[in-house]
Image: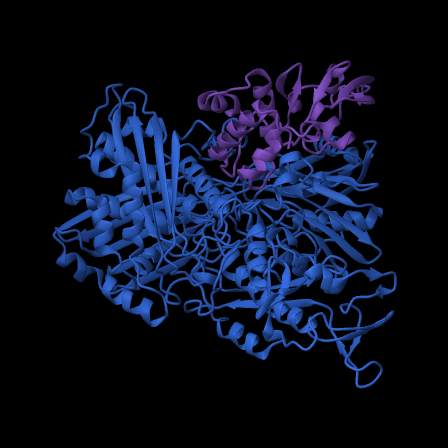
Chain colours: A purple, B blue
């Protein structure tokens, strides 16, 4: 088998904001946003788990929506404002402390993706019902099966948000 | 060290009796709301896993995999791959650095080819390993390797594989046939006389059930990093057993001294046994080590998501049963035959729980372990699966045939080793346990939570207003923590602030054992929980027991307690002796007092007779100067007693201890603690869909150390169990032997919406052999609950679906609609 003639890799420079910090990054056209965040910027909270949009472990928030960073090309993110779990933690969002308190993690590999998805939910719906939380988080897979604990944590975080608590 | 304390510790080494020396008071153990020590890191993405490791100059390694279920490489042309820019090395199976075989991990020590030239299942890593500047380049290089394969005949079905003339699955290792061999491939377990038992029975059932291949799904893919620092290996492992990895690495390249090997065991993206017990799981590390040596660069090897579907749980198989009982539910005989597949560890019986868990006297089970051209199977949360399934299938089928409540049939037959509860209760007393009826306590809690008495009905008789059929299911067995094992651990009182650090490298797979050890150490030392920390990722060179057969607390819990008790004695001694430091003499913290006059509470040492006479541990430890302790009586050998005369040296505050847990499996320890699980389902007759409305899991863990940790195992175990019972199955194409659903879109693990609700309950009878009377929980629920859906669906539709997982097509088939 002979290799096809090599196609030159298309690269471009993108400017985007991650958690309020500005970045100028040279990316190849086939790099996913997850790869750039995790491997190039060292934001290891955006985890690669299924690598095909099936699990939510790589979730980040763009334009107020939780999106799967493994399904987005970084080169498309020029000018975007991206929020990752590291930013949510830095802002001391009550979700983080509620997640710790309710032991929502076991191995922890999927946990940041849940927090990102839950943050996007609370941004939109600060007072979600249990069913709405389940609906929002159903795309996040947890092999350790921590699901019931997430519901408690998100409800508590919503409560604390109302009280204006930043832990 | 107090010889008295040491003798008490050694007295409990055998772990075959009750804990005679519990604490008088618990301040952290068993309390709710203890903050987990890994929680913040994991919630925020700061927790680092092996997949996150990125070292300067690091190469990325990937394997060639076989497109065929059975094929030999006849010729390999890697020249195009080697020429690709960014490729730094291509390791080939016939390269001189590769030995004929090496210990590459697994349940036992192994001696297997590093890069085989023959593949025995589709997707197996064979022939070549590429290391490149990026994973992407390595991937591309793999596509440039030209392989001439010689395809061989293959067989996927275990009963076909047993037939004369069937294709040989692995002629290299097993030229005589596909039943692995007489010593390892067949296991017979026999108690009493089953024919006599059948003669005594009023009712006899015979049935067959099957369990499809399910697998672990590690959120973090298998991976690892190998770096040579001169001739010293530095190794990052995604593994449940770092100490076994180290032992294996030490055997490579003609032998590497253990004290030159540094292991890093970062947070683990789960594991569930599985991959960590495969006999080739260090193949990547070996190849990485060779390439790292060639190139002078660290190498990270990794599987892709598809390759994580390497093998699966060892319960895959076909089970035939005949069982008899009297009309009152007393079971008189159980006889079974199991055909199991590709077991990567010594073949394990499947009727053990009948012996360990019941008063049934006549039991026979024959296991035949067969090879097929699929990936290997091993203990994947866990090896007790087949035992749990078989116990529950037999009990459920018999209860149905007799028209009895299955809960009553369980209670009727509870016991151990063929003896009834009266005998078992006598044994509890003999071993120093209190006498409690664990199963009864568990089922009472469970029945109340699921509403059993109100909702139980005859099979196939309850249609709900929504048109669906309603069903209830129940399963049970004992609790276990089965490894005969040892563990070493140490605790150090830090200078400067007097906090305590637990040392001992172990794999943190997420069960929160680390926090539980801190709770044990805190209560034993009299310290506040926030003053104790466990650095589990640091290779302290000890052989620390790792998550394995649910022994986190029963083995390591004891080891931590032992170290803490020795350390506490040291602290109290240090508080009573004067010392000389670099700045001069220091008086004793408690002059004129003896260690027994003092105690510690909330990290404060105090005089028992006068609690106002107190020093914090921080005050005792004091500040350490640049050359060691400046004013502290602790530290580098310091002099006590009369300055410069008759001085003695005292050790720093550090205690190392260990635990030996004897024995494993049946005939060693009687099982006293039980578990019971309940399920409520609704079945749609039109679609065959089974909706799991509610699960109730009840576990007698003897004593709870960490509530949230135990409940986490109950929730997680229920989800994994329901996945295995309802939707998880690895499918191979019968025509080509190719795995069809090696991804998370088509291999269905449960989501948040797959169980309506889960109620958990914990029972604390204190009848476990671990410290404070505890017993393990980590594997139990995921292992016991997979077949829970069976009796629940039967109760709904009135027909048995005995092929697991119970997918809609199988339900429809049972209903005669497919």
Residue B88 in the image: x percent, y percent? 82, 39
Residue B514 in the image: x percent, y percent? 59, 51
Tell me, yes or no, if residue A126 can be seen here: yes
What residue lies at 25% left-to-right and 55% top-to-bottom?
Answer: B334
Q: Please tell me whether residue B264 is drawn above or below residue A13 in the rendered image.
A: below
Residue B667 in the image: x percent, y percent? 37, 67
**Closest to the observer, B269 or B30:** B30
Q: Please tell me whether residue B411 is drawn above or below residue B134 in the rendered image.
A: below
**Closest to the observer, B455 or B817:** B455
Residue B816 placement, left or right of A118: left
Q: Please tell me whether residue B524 is drawn above or below residue B327 in the rendered image.
A: below
Residue B743 placement, left or right of B75: left
How many marks are shown on the rendered structure? 0
Tell me, yes or no, if residue A11 can be seen here: no
What residue lies at 21% left-to-right and 32% top-to-bottom?
Answer: B798
Q: Please tell me whether residue A39 is drawn above or below residue B594 in the rendered image.
A: above
**Closest to the observer, B319 or A33:** A33
Quadrant including the C terminus of chain B: top left
**Closest to the observer, B812 or B524:** B524
Residue A57 placement, left or right of B371: right
Q: Residue furthest bottom?
A: B646
Quadrant including the N terminus of chain B: bottom right
């Amino acid at each position: 088998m002979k290799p096809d003639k090599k196609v030159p890799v298309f690269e471009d420079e993108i400017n985007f904001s991650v958690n309020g910090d500005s970045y100028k990054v040279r990316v190849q056209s086939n790099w996913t946003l997850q790869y750039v965040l995790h491997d190039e910027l060292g934001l290891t909270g955006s985890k690669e788990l299924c690598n095909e949009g099936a699990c939510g472990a790589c979730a980040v928030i763009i334009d107020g929506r939780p999106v799967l960073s493994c399904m987005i090309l970084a080169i498309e993110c020029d000018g975007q404002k991206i929020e990752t779990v590291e930013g949510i933690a830095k802002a001391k969002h009550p979700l983080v402390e509620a997640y710790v308190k309710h032991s929502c993690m076991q191995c922890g590999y999927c946990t940041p993706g849940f927090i990102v998805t839950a943050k996007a939910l609370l941004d939109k719906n600060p007072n979600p019902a249990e069913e709405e939380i389940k609906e929002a988080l159903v795309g996040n897979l947890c092999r350790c099966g921590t699901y019931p604990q997430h519901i408690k944590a998100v409800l508590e975080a919503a409560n604390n948000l109302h009280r204006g608590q930043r832990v | 060290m107090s010889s008295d304390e040491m003798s008490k510790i050694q007295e409990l080494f055998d772990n075959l009796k009750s804990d005679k020396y519990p604490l008088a008071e618990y301040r952290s153990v068993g309390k709710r709301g203890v903050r987990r020590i890994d929680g913040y890191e994991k919630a925020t993405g700061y927790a680092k896993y092996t997949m996150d490791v990125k070292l300067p100059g690091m190469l990325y390694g990937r394997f060639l995999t076989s497109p065929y279920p059975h094929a030999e490489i006849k010729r390999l042309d890697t020249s195009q791959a080697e020429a690709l820019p960014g490729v730094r090395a291509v390791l080939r199976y016939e390269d001189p650095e590769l030995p004929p075989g090496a210990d590459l991990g697994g349940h036992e020590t192994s001696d297997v080819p590093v890069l085989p030239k023959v593949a025995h299942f589709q997707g197996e890593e064979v022939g070549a390993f590429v290391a490149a500047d990026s994973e992407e380049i390595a991937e591309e290089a793999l596509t440039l390797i030209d392989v001439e394969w010689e395809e061989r005949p293959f067989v996927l079905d275990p009963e076909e594989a047993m037939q004369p003339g069937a294709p040989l699955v692995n002629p290299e290792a097993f030229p005589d046939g596909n039943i692995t061999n007489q010593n390892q491939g067949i296991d017979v377990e026999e108690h009493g006389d089953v024919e006599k038992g059948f003669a005594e029975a009023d009712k006899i059932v015979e049935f067959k059930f099957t369990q499809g291949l399910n697998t672990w799904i590690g959120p973090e893919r298998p991976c690892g990093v190998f770096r040579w620092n001169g001739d010293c290996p530095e190794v990052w492992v995604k593994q449940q057993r770092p100490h076994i990895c180290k032992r294996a690495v030490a055997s490579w390249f003609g032998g590497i001294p253990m004290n030159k090997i540094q292991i890093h065991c970062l947070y683990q993206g789960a594991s569930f046994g599985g991959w960590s017990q495969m006999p080739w799981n260090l193949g990547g590390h070996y190849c990485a080590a060779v390439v790292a040596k060639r190139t002078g660069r660290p190498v990270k090897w990794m599987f892709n998501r598809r390759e994580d579907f390497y093998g699966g749980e060892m319960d895959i198989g076909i089970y035939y049963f005949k069982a008899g009982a009297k009309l009152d539910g007393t079971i008189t005989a159980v006889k079974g035959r199991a055909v199991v597949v590709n077991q990567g560890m010594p073949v394990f019986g499947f009727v053990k729980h009948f012996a360990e868990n019941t008063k049934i006297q006549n039991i026979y089970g024959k296991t035949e372990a067969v090879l097929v051209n699929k990936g290997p199977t091993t203990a994947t949360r866990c090896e007790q699966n087949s035992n749990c399934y078989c116990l529950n299938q037999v009990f459920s089928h018999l209860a149905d045939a007799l028209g009895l409540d299955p809960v009553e049939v369980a209670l009727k037959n509870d016991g151990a080793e063929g003896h009834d509860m009266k005998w078992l209760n006598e044994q509890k007393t003999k071993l120093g346990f209190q006498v409690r009826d664990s199963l009864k306590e568990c089922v009472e809690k469970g029945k109340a939570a699921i509403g059993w008495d109100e909702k139980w009905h005859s099979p196939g008789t309850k249609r709900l207003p929504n048109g669906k059929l309603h069903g209830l299911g129940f399963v049970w067995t004992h609790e276990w923590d089965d490894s005969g094992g040892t563990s070493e651990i140490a605790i150090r009182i830090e200078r400067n602030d007097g906090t305590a650090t637990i040392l001992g490298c172990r794999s943190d797979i997420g069960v929160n054992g680390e926090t539980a050890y801190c709770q044990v150490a805190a209560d034993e030392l009299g310290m506040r929980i926030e003053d104790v920390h466990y650095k589990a990722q640091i290779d302290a060179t000890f052989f620390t027991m790792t998550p394995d057969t649910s022994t986190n607390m029963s083995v390591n819990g004891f080891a931590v307690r032992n170290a803490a008790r020795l350390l506490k004695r040291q602290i109290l001694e240090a508080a009573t002796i004067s010392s000389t430091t670099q700045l001069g003499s220091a008086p004793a913290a408690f002059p004129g007092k003896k260690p027994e006059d003092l105690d510690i509470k909330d990290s404060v040492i105090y005089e028992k007779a006068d609690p106002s006479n107190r020093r914090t541990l921080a005050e005792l430890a004091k500040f350490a100067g640049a050359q060691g302790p400046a004013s502290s009586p602790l530290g580098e050998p310091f002099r006590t007693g009369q300055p410069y005369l008759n001085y003695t040296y005292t050790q720093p505050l550090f205690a190392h201890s260990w635990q030996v847990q004897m024995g494993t499996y049946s005939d060693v320890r009687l099982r006293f603690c039980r578990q019971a699980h309940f399920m409520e389902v609704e079945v749609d007759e039109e679609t065959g869909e089974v909706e799991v409305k509610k699960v109730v899991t009840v576990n007698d863990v003897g004593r709870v150390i960490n509530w949230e940790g135990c409940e986490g195992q109950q929730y997680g175990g229920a989800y994994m169990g329901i996945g295995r019972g309802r939707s998880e199955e690895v499918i191979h194409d019968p025509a080509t032997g190719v795995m069809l659903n090696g991804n998370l879109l088509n291999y269905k693990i449960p989501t948040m919406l797959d169980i309506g609700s889960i109620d958990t309950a914990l029972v604390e009878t204190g009848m476990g052999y671990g410290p404070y009377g505890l017993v393990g929980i980590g594997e139990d629920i995921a292992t016991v609950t997979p077949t829970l859906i069976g009796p629940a669906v039967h109760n709904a539709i009135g027909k048995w679906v005995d092929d697991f997982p119970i997918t809609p097509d199988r339900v429809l088939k049972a209903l005669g609609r497919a």
